[in-house]
Image: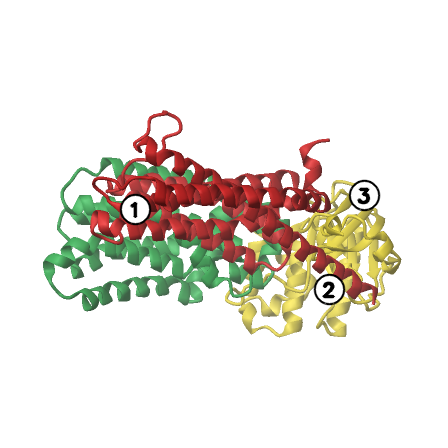
Amino acid sequence: MRALLIRDLTLALRAGGGFGLGLAFFLIVTVLVPFSVGPQAELLQVIAPGVLWLGALLACLLSLDRLLALDFEDGTLDLLVTAPLPLEAALSVKALAHWLTTGLPLVLAAPVLGVLLNLAPPGYLWLVASLALGTPALSVIGCFGAALTVAIKRGGLLLSLLVLPLYVPTLIFGAEVARRGAGGQEVTTPLLMLAGITCAVIALMPFASAAVLRMGLR
Amino acid sequence: MSIWSYANPVKFLTLSARVQPVLWVLSLAFVATGLIWGFFGTPEDYRQGATVKIIYLHVPAALMAINAWFMMLVASLIWLIRRHHVSALAAKAAAPVGVVMTVIALLTGAIWGQPMWGTWWAWDPRLTSFLILFLFYLGYIALWEAVEDPDTAADLTSVLCLVGSVFAVLSRYAVQFWNQGLHQGTSVPVATGGRSVDDVFFYPLVLCMIGFGLLFIALVFYRTGTEIRLRRAAALRARAGRAA
Amino acid sequence: MGYPSAMMLRTDNLTLARGGVPVLTGLSLALAPGQALILRGPNGAGKTTLLRSIAGLQPPLAGRIEGAQDRIAYAAHADGLKAMLSVTENLTFWARVFGHTDITPALDAFDLHGLADRLAGTLSAGQKRRLGLARLLVTGRPVWVLDEPTVSLDTGAVALFAEALRAHLRQGGSALIATHIDLRIEAQVLDITPFRATSATRAGASDEAFL
């Protein structure tokens, strides 16, 4: 399992695109927001938590079709299915690698972009906390979507259509934590809900992902 | 004879041919009676005026939009466990009907909302939930269309339906938490027996709901029959192509 | 070293489908440790389908496969190599996935020492193929299931492969190979053409219920 994680991380670093692309996309989306809604500091302050969450979510989505498609094309997935490693574990590891190369950089970059959007000072901690809790769920759910569409030619757009509705609960609770945090309100309830969703998804989703991947490879 | 014998496509077509005329007549009779009674036979609401009458389309459509997904969930489970083709095709056939019901519910809701709340759309929990349900339907149908092998498509969409159901419920609670809404409580709480709609409005509404339910069943029968014939045609073509 | 278990690989009355239509029916074969079996048959006869089923990638419509669970090393047209990893890294990865660490014998057998630090993406087609076959050695699995293993290999490389295969068989391994060229090894040959599904024997197709 560690071998697979190391390999995926090495590939993400060497192939260039995977690592920086999501981050660059996040940066650009965030920078474009003031251009579209205007530069008023108060307005930006109000929408900052939501915009940052949405940007992170889209950046996550962007790299999903690389998660399994590359391994499908060169036959690695077929070989992994015949390997002694359970497919559920292999997919969990791949989702973890996706989070480390996409989700984690987004979490770390979010406060910097928060400055650009005039995020309220108490919000930084909760923004980072909510993204750190929520982005793993995005990677794991995305892995399910990638497994669903892996055998479909040009499945990229379909992948977005399937995955985005599944992201709704995570987005709602995650952005709510960030919003309440920025407003200095109580955050416990949405934070617990977000943590609950992430834990449940990490525990259960790999089984669904492995099941659909086996069906798709047949 | 067990109910599973109707999982055989040919048997299903025979049954379907027998019950479909009855279903069509009954459903149209119920819908027509309900709508005519509702539109012309009930007084106007003292606050809402004539706009209240859109309830006879809105509520039954919303009811069937949810029940169609529920039916797809059950059919998907049957496919995954017992692998009856009819079940998978019935789920496939129900999805577009469900979408149309969802769209009717959303549109009539918007048309009703405009005079009542002064807005076409509000990010109210119920409205938002329906919008999310609509997205789930779209994804489900798109996946059916995208996968070439019909059995693989049935497998993948069934799992998507299961996972989607969990997330749809989750979204429902998330949305409720996110925004307390304008929308009134449910019009016909079945479990409690109490209801917020007056008797005068209630009976035609029940007729409409029964009618929409029957109409849904008739449509699913019809569309499943079409899907079965499509598969049959494809199977015959495959055989003919190999023999040549 | 040798392979510990002396289990036979058996298939019993297999019916296999491709795209929902049966291609092979009533196929039974047995493969004892130390034996190789060459599959022959024209294109489209179902060789790849048979190999994928035995490797556990697709379930048979009917029949049973015994002695394949966790004992198969599968190699097909795609080698599962990463262009951005070196030869050593590719092999080490697969070795560790299968719970091993030593890749030197595999590098020896396919004469890959000179290429060890090259990125797999810079190799020629034949060199990639050698790397893909070297992967079989690092799995430590006793049953090799190979689909056209000699594609794009030159005569020297084919000889290397045949030598590796003979060594594998001597150690009590076995191999099931779909190939058209003569590998010059001692092997049984099974022509799968007689098992092709005809219109009379197509029972069990997934679309059968619709007819």
From the image, which quarter does the C terminus of chain B lie in? bottom right
Residue A73 picture location, percent across and down: 57, 63
Q: Mark 3 points at which residue?
A: C8
Q: What element carries label 2?
A: loop
- Distance (Cα) linking label 2 and label 3: 22 Å
How many neighbours does mark 3 have within 10 angstroms: few (below 14), some (14-19), or many (20 or more)? Answer: some
Q: Residue furthest front?
A: B41
Residue A40 is at least partly visible in this image:
yes
Q: Quadrant of residue C133?
A: bottom right
Residue C177 picture location, percent across and down: 78, 59
| Chain that is red in the image | B
From the image, which quarter does the N terminus of chain B lie in? top right
- Asked if the residues shown at circle 2 and circle 3 are in contact, with their CB atoms under 8 angstroms apart, the answer is no
> Viewed as shown, does residue B181 lie left or right of C209?
left
Which residue is drawn at the image coordinates 40% and 37% (left, top)?
B204
Chain under disc 1: A
Chain under disc 2: C
Q: Chain C is drawn in which colour?
A: yellow
Question: Which of the marked residues, 2 or 3, is nearer the chain's N terminus?
Answer: 3
> Viewed as shown, does residue C105 lie left or right of B40?
right
- Distance (Cα) linking label 3 and label 1: 56 Å
Q: Name the residue under label 1.
A: A172
Which residue is drawn at the image coordinates 53% and 67% (left, top)?
C83
Amino acid type at mark 1 = Ile
> Viewed as shown, does residue A11 lie left or right of B85?
left
**Figure check: B115 above or below A203:** below
Amino acid type at mark 3 = Met
Q: Quadrant of residue C185?
A: bottom right
How many neighbours does mark 2 have within 10 angstroms: few (below 14), some (14-19), or many (20 or more)? Answer: many
| Chain that is green in the image | A
Q: Name the residue under label 2.
A: C149
Residue A202 is at least partly visible in this image:
no
